[in-house]
Structure formats: C-alpha cells, structure tokens
Image (spheres, grey):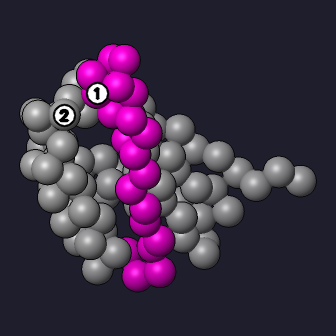
C-alpha cells in the first residue's frame, strides 16, 4: 500500500492561516476520496524561526496517481502560505 508524505516549511507568521487551509484541504480530500486517511504533523525549529510540516496520506488501496494528482491540485494555493516548496515522497511498507 503506497503512502504519500509531503513536507514543507512554514514561517510562524503564517501558521494559523496555513493550518486552516491544510486542514480544510484534507477534509475536502477525504470527502472526494472515500477511505482516505490524512494527518498533519508539525516539527518546531526555533533556531530557524520556522516549522516543518508534514501531510500524510494513506488509503486501503494505496495512493495511486489519481489520488496524488487530486492532492497536488488542491494544494496549489498553499504555495503562497509556505516558505519554499512542497516535497512529496511516496513510501511502501517494508517486506
């Protein structure tokens, strides 16, 4: 089952706005893709004055190309709220 992990950085001044956007985006994706499980994780980096955020996406049938495209399509507007780019990485369970 292929899972998707997407990470990026957020400046403290944009935390509330970015959080509201991502959580609503994930709720919309769950409605669009039945069975989709999402999470938003945050790691503070005080020395860098920013946070690293990670969105996770899992589905019983795996995250296929169509699901990944839907995630990326909905996330386009997030680029104005983050510091840098979003980095998407897919993983499979270890044997």
Question: SS class of the residue under badge 2?
Answer: helix
Please tell me which residue is depicted at 37% across the width and 41% down the height of the picture.
53
Which quadrant: the N terminus?
bottom right
Please state the extent of the stretch shown in magenta in the rendering: 32-53
Q: Residue 7: give x, y in percent of width and height.
A: 41, 37
Q: Is residue 93 left or right of residue 7?
A: right
Looking at the image, is 42 positioned above or below residue 28? above
Question: Eyeballing the image, is 69 above or below 79?
Answer: below
The structure residue drawn at horizontal position 40% and vertical position 45%, both measured from the top left corner, is: 42
Q: Is residue 7 above or below residue 65?
A: above
Disc sitting over residue 39 in the figure: none
Res 58 visible: yes
Residue 47 shown in magenta = yes
Seen at 89% across and 53% down, the residue is 95
Residue at label 1?
50
Q: Which residue is mark 2?
A: 12
- Along the line of sight, which residue is nearer the eye, 66 or 57? 57
């Amino acid at each position: 089952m292929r899972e998707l992990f997407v990470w990026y950085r957020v400046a403290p001044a944009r935390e509330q706005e970015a959080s509201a956007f991502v959580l609503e985006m994930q709720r919309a994706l769950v409605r669009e893709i039945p069975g989709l499980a999402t999470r938003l994780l945050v790691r503070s980096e005080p020395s860098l004055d920013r946070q690293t955020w990670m969105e996770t996406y899992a589905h019983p049938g795996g995250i296929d190309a169509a699901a990944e495209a839907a995630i990326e399509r909905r996330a386009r507007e997030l680029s104005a709220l983050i510091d840098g780019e979003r980095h998407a990485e897919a993983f499979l369970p270890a044997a």
